[in-house]
Amino acid sequence: MVYINEELCKGCYICIDICPKGVYSKSDKVNKKGVPMPEADSDKCIKCKLCTLMCPDQVISIGDGD
């Protein structure tokens, strides 16, 4: 399962650009700061964790065993 901390996300979309499986996409949902949030399709995730490594604000976490 892919978890996105909505309070910390600043909408840089590095996760969208870096994901080799296209897990992330832009959504219409905004956080409290008014930043459009990425959404994740956890079913596509292969748990390579590139997104967690590249996210500058450590917003994303990948649940093991889900």
Image (cartoon, rainbow, N blue to C red):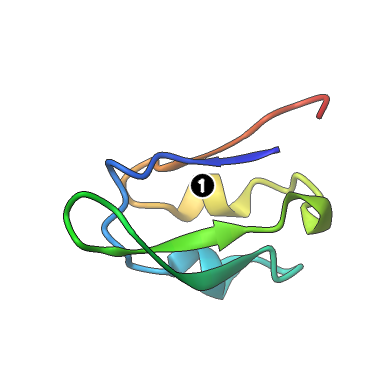
Q: Residue furthest left?
A: 33
Q: Is 7 located above or below residue 14 in the figure? A: above
Q: Quadrant of the C terminus?
A: top right
Q: Is 13 located above or below residue 55 in the figure? A: below
Q: How many dots with numbers? A: 1
Q: Residue, x 76% and y 68% (percent of image)?
A: 21
Q: Nearer the viewer, residue 66 or 31?
A: 31
Helix, strand or loop status at disc 1: helix
Could you tell me residue 30's position as x and y percent?
32, 61
Residue occupied by mark 1 = 53
Could you tell me residue 8's position as x and y percent?
28, 43
Q: Residue furthest top?
A: 65
Could you tell me residue 24's position as x and y percent?
60, 65
Please identify the quarter of the rendering in which residue 5 is found: top left
Q: Is 59 located above or below residue 35 in the figure? A: above
Graded by Cα atoms within 10 Å as few (under 14), some (14 to 19) or many (20 or more), the crowding at tag 1 reads few
Q: Quadrant of the N terminus?
A: top right
With 16 as the anchor, is 20 left or right in this view? right
Could you tell me residue 45's position as x and y percent?
77, 52
Q: Nearer the viewer, residue 46 or 11?
A: 11
Q: Amino acid at mark 1?
A: Leu
Q: Residue, x 40% and y 43% (percent of image)?
A: 59
Q: Residue, x 36% and y 45% (percent of image)?
A: 6
